[in-house]
Image: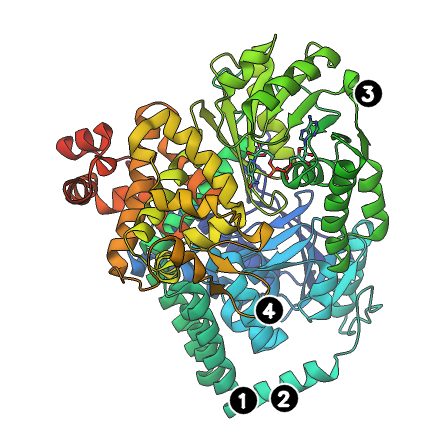
Amino acid sequence: MEVAVKEPEFRLLRVDVASDGVAHVVLDDPSEPVNTISEELGAEMRRLWARLKADPAVRSILISSGKKGNFVAGAKLEMIQRVQDAKEAEALSRTAQDMFDEIAASEKPVVVAIDGAALGGGLELALACHYRLASLARHTKLGLPETQLGLIPGAGGTQRLPRLIGIARALDLILTGRQVDARRALRMGLVDEAVPEPLLLQVARERARALGEGRPPRPGRGEGFRPPTAAELRELALERNPIGRRILFSQARKQALEKSRGHYPAIPAAIEAVETGIEQGYERGLAREAELFGELAVTDVSRNLVRLFFAQTALKKATGVADSNVRPKEVRSVAMLGAGLMGGGIAYVTSAIAGIPVRFKEKDAEGLGRGFAYVRRVLDDRVRRKRITPVEREEVMARITGTTRYDGFSNVDLVIEAVFEDLELKHRVIREIEEVIREDCILASNTSTIPITRLAEASRRPENVVGMHYFSPVEKMPLLEVIRGKKTGDSAVATAVALGKAQGKTVIVVNDGPGFYTSRILAPYMMEAAWLLAEGGDIAQIDEAMRDWGFPVGPFTLLDEVGIDVGASVTRTMVEAFGERMLPPDAFERVVADGRKGRKNKKGFYRYGGKRKEVDESIYDLLGSRTRKRFSREEIQERLYLQMCNEAALCLQEGILQEPRDGDVGAVFGLGFPPFRGGPFRWMDALGPQEVVRRLRIYEERIGHRFRPAQLLVDMAREGRRFFSD
Ligand code: NAI
């Protein structure tokens, strides 16, 4: 007898109709670790829907995910990146809207059980269902992060969300891209029930059955439920009246403009989509949403943000070494030398995020106390914001121990040193550490400028010495720059990369040199600001110009935060390595000599302690005169970004960077380079290397040598090449 092998009808989903009338649809993309909303899924859903509609045995539908800890991560971004024009992107949005409308219009009730990330299109799918349950597991996160990619929710999200949870809250979620857990989602009405993970499917099924039989479900009003407060009721009342709404939308626009400085068109677009839907009705709202989605999808801003997202994803998978046989060593314990600002932060991400025990070593008990206090402060803040429980805080604290000698170092797998930035001191501690650690223990340094190869000169096992350059504040800054010294072995690099990823960082690997990549490109940028100041520039104007260009803070604010003394020591290293072109103006030396260290001693470019942030005018006396000259904004911006970009090109030319992608990620996530510009290399591509060289030459002629374009740029300009092909 011949048996016909039937092709499975669906690739991305499974369906099972049980005798209780509940059709259970499980989303499970077999080729990917997470589910995404794609055209293929849309087509399968449509076919499935037709079938479920026609099947008399089906009374209600339950949707869940087959991926552990992940519901639907969002729309498939490759699909959006492929579109050629706005119309094509608009059509994608329309298709998704239609599909979700069909779900919403289904006469058979649709229940959705969310466990794990329900983001973007994933949450929009859930919004179209009639009853939502979310698991209380930590990995459950709901949100609409589209604006962070320069897009807006394009599958009905800008229409359904405000109708469900109110305009102000919907705008907050959409404009910030914030993600909320099940408890918060329940409180704001985003889901109907929050259920412990092991019970999720069972409870969801009961709800589906009840709804299928025409009985409204009676949720147990699980954890996190509370009635609305008086303030919330007032907010809703405001939203019900047209004048109140007009105020609300205009305030949202004003705030958004202040924050985005007009660089992120998705922000006003999202507000417009929501407003259109509220004022002109659902259908008009949907049409506007799709139109705006289409326009945004093809902007440079969105393309750059999506590329950065892809670069981060690729780096998450990378091991940091070319040899695929190299495996990172398992790190079960870390010793932290120096419990200062950086040591404290690194101890936090190691113990709390990576879950690895940490042993502090400090000069004295006071130093140790500072380290413990730092971690505790970060944890306290997380407890206050209900991100972790007090018990979890104590669990983390219990992983941290301290010593003022080196006891306990003999069995750690990796040591990170973050003592003062002083070569002799660092050499001394490396020798001391090697007396006590195991032969295979990896020795990482958090130096921000000293070449790892030079540090390793004090080591008997330079193959185990690697740079792990974190950024301050460590618990907030997403980047880790791993540095491979001349003699650093693959195993040390791979281990440092794996540890960084476990600590939640985006990790780039660069080759060694003074300042590596990030500090190196920051130095001439900061120096140029100092030159503008020496030429009579105005501190507030220079800072403002760079914020306007898209940096989160201006160079002088940054220097005050980092420490002017730290800046001075970086400068010395850079001048020693690169000579005259990194030389600061004399005026900078006068500022340093005046004992100004920035925020930490409340004496810097700005005044501290007052209510408003104000330039400390007395600093101008050191520079000759309080009368300041105003440069054109373009000149300030151009001189600063040209310095940074040209230095980045030099890093690529010299092999400090392995590829431009790493340079873009490093500048954006380590230094705050404007993400919508994609990073220094994407930005140079956008201008075109020819134009970059032309602008550099103008300043080279007018100001001098330090603007001489990198040879790589000159060659690229001549040959008409670019850094990226896409
Ligand atoms: P910090 O002054 O806050 O901390 C240094 C700590 O090392 C102090 O607590 C000191 O008591 C301790 N220490 C000194 N000698 C020691 C020894 N022999 N044994 C044990 N502990 C000792 O300095 P910070 O800012 O944490 O910098 C540390 C390192 O991190 C430096 O190499 C710096 O260049 C680097 N770095 C700093 C960044 C920043 O933004 N502050 C950013 C990236 C790297």
For image coordinates 44% across by 84% down, the residue present is: 280
Q: Residue at x 51, y 39 (%)?
A: 566
Q: Closer to us: mark 1 or mark 4?
A: 1
At which x and y percent is residue 202?
A: 81, 54
Helix, strand or loop at mark 2 = helix
Location of mark 2 (residue) = 237
| Mark pair 1, 4: CA separation | 34 Å
- Residue 106 bears which disc, if any? 4
Q: Which mark is residue 244?
A: 1
Depth check, mark 2 against mark 3: the one in front is 3
Please state which amino acid type lies under the numbered disc 1.
Gly
How far apart are labels 4 and 2 at the CA level?
31 Å
Label 3 CA crowd tier, 10 Å (few <14, some 14–19, many 20+): few
**Image: 722 above or below 286:** above
Q: How far separated are the C-alphas under marks 4 and 3?
A: 67 Å
Closer to the chain start, of discs 4 and 2, is 4
In terms of secondary structure, where does tag 3 sit? loop
Residue annotated with mark 3: 407
